[in-house]
Amino acid sequence: MSFTVPPPPLDIADHFPDLVPHARSTTLLYPRAGAPGRWESSLGGPLLWPADELWPTCAAPDHYNPARGRAVVGPDPVAMVSVVQLFAKDVPALTFPAGTDVLQVLWCPLIHSEYDQWSPVPALRWRSAVEAASGQLRGEAPKPYEFDDEYVPRPCVVHPTEAVEYPNWDLPDNLVERVGEWSDEVEETTGISYFDAFTTRQSKVGGYPGWTQAPRWPECVCGERMEHLLTISASESCGRWLPVEERTSPGSGWEVSDARQDNSHGMVMGDAGGIHVFVCRACPNWPTIHRYDC
Ligand SMILES: [Zn+2]
Ligand SMILES: [Zn+2]
């Protein structure tokens, strides 16, 4: 079920038309603790997984659990955990490879040095729901015998909601200063800044990566800059994007106190960090790469 996002405090086309070409559609996921089924889109929920398909594991030689004094884990492979499952019908703006309609993201809940990211490394599966269900389905997923609980999501239902957002860290150089000044004016008149009103930093599909730090867009092996596929963010506190359905008091949202963090996936991911997954749809098999920032 989608949520209803309150309208922004003002129309950007009327007030700052130079930003209009930088608008991007995004699908905000709004993960909320619950008991999703394997036939549902979810964050940290059970995956639609054929019984005869091996569950992915990780035996990276250097992965470690910081909660245990950075001791390297192993050598037995660690079962990956389910992070996201999205059915195409729930995220109409997301392009799937031909013949597939389910995107699944898993990761090994330990810290890896791959790409110097010091984070879990997302593993993606694009599959056909009908094909997956043509045989037996897996019951319980195996549990990792070692994990960093900052990267193990509590099972959540999701409420994929289409929204339009504008760049934060990804503002073009020639607009940074003007938008900064305008943001202060907006805050004086509406009580909320441009950044809080028009940019998002919560789990989402498409749109701008929910950067915490300066952008580090990856380049594909083909030389193209990769596209932002999705962000899994520690921050689900929404601010002005807090949906109408969850508001207990009126207001622009920024001042609406909420405890969404407690009611979401519970992953701290470093310090309010996020993992951003990028894809190149120009290359065969759609290679992906991730960026971790916090
Ligand atoms: Zn690992
Ligand atoms: Zn490429």
Image (spheres, helix red, strand yellow):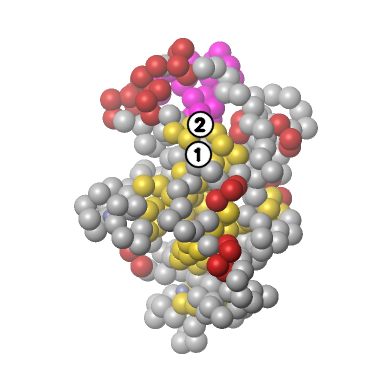
Report the side of 72 relative to 49 (left or right).
left
The disc placed on residue 26 is 1
Q: Amino acid at mark 2?
A: Val
Q: Magenta stretch?
A: 179-198
Task: Work out which residue is located at the far left of the displayed protein and give it.
Answer: 223
What is the x, y in percent for residue 97? 42, 56
Q: Residue furthest bottom?
A: 75
Residue corresponding to mark 2: 164
Residue 122 shows which numbered tag?
Answer: none
The residue located at (46%, 44%) in the rendering is 206
State yes or no: discs 2 and 1 in contact (Cβ < 8 Å): yes
User: Is label 2 in a helix, a strand or a loop?
Assistant: strand
Left or right of 207, for residue 147: right
Task: Return the residue nearer the eye: 206 or 188.
Answer: 206
Work out whether residue 157 or residue 150 is closer to the camera in this orientation and state it.
157
Side of 222 where 76 appears, left or right: right
Q: Assign a secondary structure to mark 1.
A: strand
Q: Quadrant of the N terminus?
A: top right
- Point out the tag, 2 or 1, that comes first from the N-terminus: 1
Magenta stretch encompasses residue 194: yes
Q: Is residue 5 magenta?
A: no
For badge 1, the amino acid type reads: Thr
Give coordinates of residue 191: x percent, y percent. 59, 20
